[in-house]
Image (cartoon, rainbow, N blue to C red):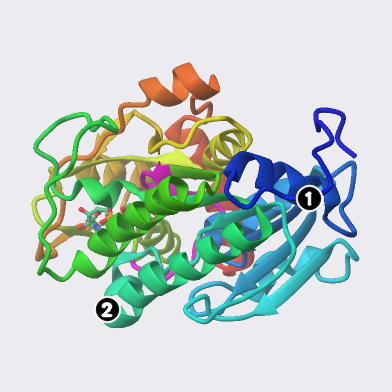
Amino acid sequence: MPSSHVEPSLEPDPLNHDHLAKWRGYYAPNRPSHHKRILVTGGAGFIGSHLVDRLMEEGNEVIVVDSLFTGKKSNILRWLNNPKFEFVRHDVTLPYQAEVDQIYHLACPASPVHYKYNAIKTVKTNVLGTMNMLGLAKRVGAHFLLASTSEVYGDPQVHPQSEEYWGNVNPCGLRSCYDEGKRVAETLTMDYSRQHGVEVRIVRIFNTYGPRMVENDGRVVSNFVTQALEGKPLTLYGDGKQTRSFCYVSDLVDGMIRMMNSEHAGPLNLGNPEEFTVESLAHIVREMVNPNLEIVHMAATPDDPTRRQPDITKAKNLLNWQPKVRLRDGLSLMIEEFRERCNL
Ligand SMILES: O=c1ccn([C@@H]2O[C@H](COP(=O)(O)OP(=O)(O)O[C@H]3OC[C@@H](O)[C@H](O)[C@H]3O)[C@@H](O)[C@H]2O)c(=O)[nH]1
């Protein structure tokens, strides 16, 4: 039994959320005392699998629920025979039940190419999937963390973006399934907190990169690294003057775990505030892999945000968190892993 727990009375008070949560925590059967039982939806994906590594290394029990639409079993291969680990191939748009203490809800395709592929499914994943996981959190008294996104700011008119900014999102465009889907997911999360007393956390994840990105998922860092290693021209969409701020995956995962174990609901930005034009990213990758590569311009994608940079003051103050890995250092780790994994 965790020492911080105060023993509640034998009967739960269903009208008192705080008491109910404590009661559930205290009397739950099979409750481990030294670690947590943690559900990670989307745990076989890029960010999810790095999060799972950290949670398993810390000695927790981890259940991964993933439909494998974009996730891969190979990302969690090292844990498959571990008795503290369980993989469930399941789509979160359908209910799922398990007795857990924490839920990290990441399930959703994240690359614009993937989330636009079946836009209605993307909305369903964000709305039904988030409702299902919040319902589970409510039933079992688990803490719930939503992996939201910088895309809730749309094409921002405020720069850099702080959590107070409400965003500039097209509700009817090609990206809306993801942007609006995540906005509803945030709304649902806050409503489950207000209406049902669920302990929630919302993090808004800015562009993240690193090992295990799907090499052809269409996102800019994975595209440039794969193209460079294959000796192909780097594809710059639009004029290349649009900006992004790239966070290395280990920094991001550290922020997510700190947030889950904090007292703060958020929303909270997690990202690296170093801002680059996409063109300058192409130059950096080219210089690191092969300075002779060509850079070709292609048409811009619709509703592509023109600038993006997180204001991380809140994360610094509340979580004592800030990214440590500089872009070139993170890129060289990623390039090395891509070379090995993809035989490039
Ligand atoms: O080959 C490419 C790919 C992309 N790009 C450009 O690079 C920029 C970044 O594009 P990405 O597809 O990597 O990512 P985006 O910033 O559009 O979306 C991202 O935002 C935040 C996350 O929540 C999302 O999951 C992620 O997809 C865009 O301006 C895009 O047009 C290129 O110039 N060339």
Q: Horizontal and vertical percent for residue 299? A: 9, 66
Residue 270: percent from left, percent from top: 43, 36
Q: Could you tell whether 182 is left or right of 323 in the image?
A: left
Residue stretch rendered in magenta on the structure:
203-218
Q: Is residue 340 above or below residue 206?
A: below
* Mark 2, residue position: 119
Which quadrant, please, contains the N terminus? top right
Question: What residue would you read off at disc 1?
Answer: 11
Q: How dense is the environment of label 2, judged by Cα within 10 Å: few (below 14), some, or many (20 and up)?
A: some
Q: Secondary structure at mark 1?
A: loop
Q: Would you say residue 51 is visible in this rendering? A: yes
Q: Residue at x 21, y 29 (%)?
A: 160
Q: Where on the picture, by quarter, is residue 313? A: top left
Front residue of this view, candidates 24 and 128: 24
Amino acid beneath label 2:
Ala
The residue at 88%/59% (across/down) is 29
Instruction: Give the left or right position of residue 98, taking residue 308 as reference.
Output: right
Asked where in the image residue 182 lies, by quadrant, the reply is bottom left
Q: Amino acid at mark 1?
A: Glu
The answer to whether mark 1 is within 8 Å of ligand 1 is: no
Q: Look at the magenta stretch and give its main secondary structure.
A: loop
Left or right: 21, with 269 as reference point: right
- Which of discs 1 and 2 lies nearer the camera? The answer is 1
